[in-house]
Amino acid sequence: MLKNKNILVGITAGIAGYKICELIRMYKKAGANVRVVLTPNAQHLVSKLTLQTLSNNEVYIENFEINNYKPEHIALTEADIFVIAPATANSIGKIANGICDNLLLSTACAFANPMLIVPAMNTNMWNNPFVQENIKKLKTAGYHILEPADGFLACGTNGVGRMREPEDIFEKTVKILTGRLDGKKILITAGGTKEKIDPVRYISNSSSGKMGIALADNAYSMGADVTLISTFSVDRNYKNIVTPTALEMEKAVKENFAEQDCVIMASAVADYRVKNYSEQKIKKGVNEGKDDELTLKLVKNPDILKEICAERNASNSRSAGVRVKPIIAGFCAESENLIENAKIKIQNKGCDFLIANDISRKDIGFNSDENEVYILDKNLNIKHIEKDTKQNIAKRILEEIFEQV
Ligand code: CTP
């Protein structure tokens, strides 16, 4: 999987440093060439000899050990990815502020390829507003952060701060280097539901389902195990469950969502359905003999997105190393006050991401081949994805969401 990839591993002085020996073994087994750089304090926690033996390479700690006539921190940047694990609050703060007072930090400052930072620290340190500010700064600048898990910590307490396991770090590295979602299960819904009035008529909306299909196609080509639940049938190589109505979609989503790594509700689910479906075609003049008016009574449909988020939150055990699964994203179609309404909607639905688009614009959204979206996360961070084809927008959405999966 990682054949010919050059991975630079950075270890800072976190007690979880011993677990990096296993990570290096995994990288080597997958065919990567591994070099290791330590902060001076990290050498008290994990031995240089062990790391040298596992990586079959020199291990770097101090500045100014001349290598090939290039300054060491520049020579070390010749790698496809720099994985810093564990990353302490101290090193995170320095990286986020361009401080270079050891070889690892100078290398981080000069590194131009993707960087994966894997924090590990005490819960109060993780929750410290300055640490959070630094994490936010790094995320905004495009650094990959593998956020710590909730579990037992070396300081004897339980809480968020535990370094993610070597398997997770390995998986994340592969994903960053190959852009692949192999082994990930993803469920996507698409299309406007058709709420039946009688055997030949229904109430629906203008959603074409193009965005949902673009998401499913891209997830499939990135290697994911895709299930598309759509209101019309789609001829593809992935699983497709056809559910024309909101109630049918609700049943299919509920039967399938718990086993997924990610669910994206891109369908336009009708908020109401006809209360009394007529088995026979409705004839003119059923309303007390008049045929110039017809009254249809509508009843509320279930809010599928809100219900699966509630179910997921109730059943998710947030114990050691267990991730919140599945990650759930919804769409948000608004014709006015896009961002304000999206902020309210993500909180109301309880999902992890909300992709907001302005349906009042004629050039994007419903039925168009292009879109322009804002991706909100549950902390109300907003990322703008400029107007592009739905295919490219879908890829960007998947990359953003799968940062967390
Ligand atoms: N959704 C859902 N079930 C519904 C209505 C919507 O699962 N009965 C999902 C959609 O698939 C979408 C998200 O909720 O991912 C937001 O849909 P949207 O139509 O923007 O909002 P509504 O919840 O319908 O709220 P409103 O119409 O009041 O804006």
Image (spheres, rainbow, N blue to C red):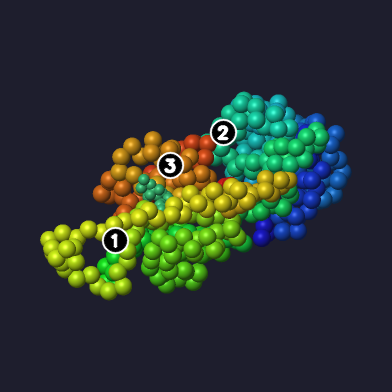
Q: Residue 292 is drawn in which quadrant?
A: bottom left
Which residue occupies 13% across, 63% down? 290
Q: Which amino acid does label 2 sit on?
A: Lys
Compare residues 80 and 21 and report the one nearer the observer.
Answer: 21
Measured along the vertical axis of the image, is residue 39 above or below residue 309?
above
Name the quarter where the N terminus is drawn.
Answer: bottom right
Mark sitting earlier along the chain (1/2)? 2
Residue under circle 2? Answer: 136
Which residue bears the numbered disc 3? 345
Where residue 392 appears, as percent x and y from the top left, is 42, 53
Secondary structure under tag 2 reads helix
Three-letter residue code for mark 3: Lys
CA gap, disc 3 and disc 1: 24 Å
Label 2 vs 3, first from the N-terminus: 2
**Dot 2, how many residues are within 10 Å of its Cα: few (below 14), some (14-19), or many (20+)?**
some
Does the Cβ of the disc 3 residue fall within 8 Å of ligand 1?
yes
387 versus 211 height, above or below: above
Q: Which residue has dot 1 on it? A: 203
Give the label, 1 or 2, closer to the camera. 1
Residue at left offset 27%, top offset 46%: 361
Disc 1 residue crowd, few under 14, some 14–19, many 20+, Cα 10 Å: some
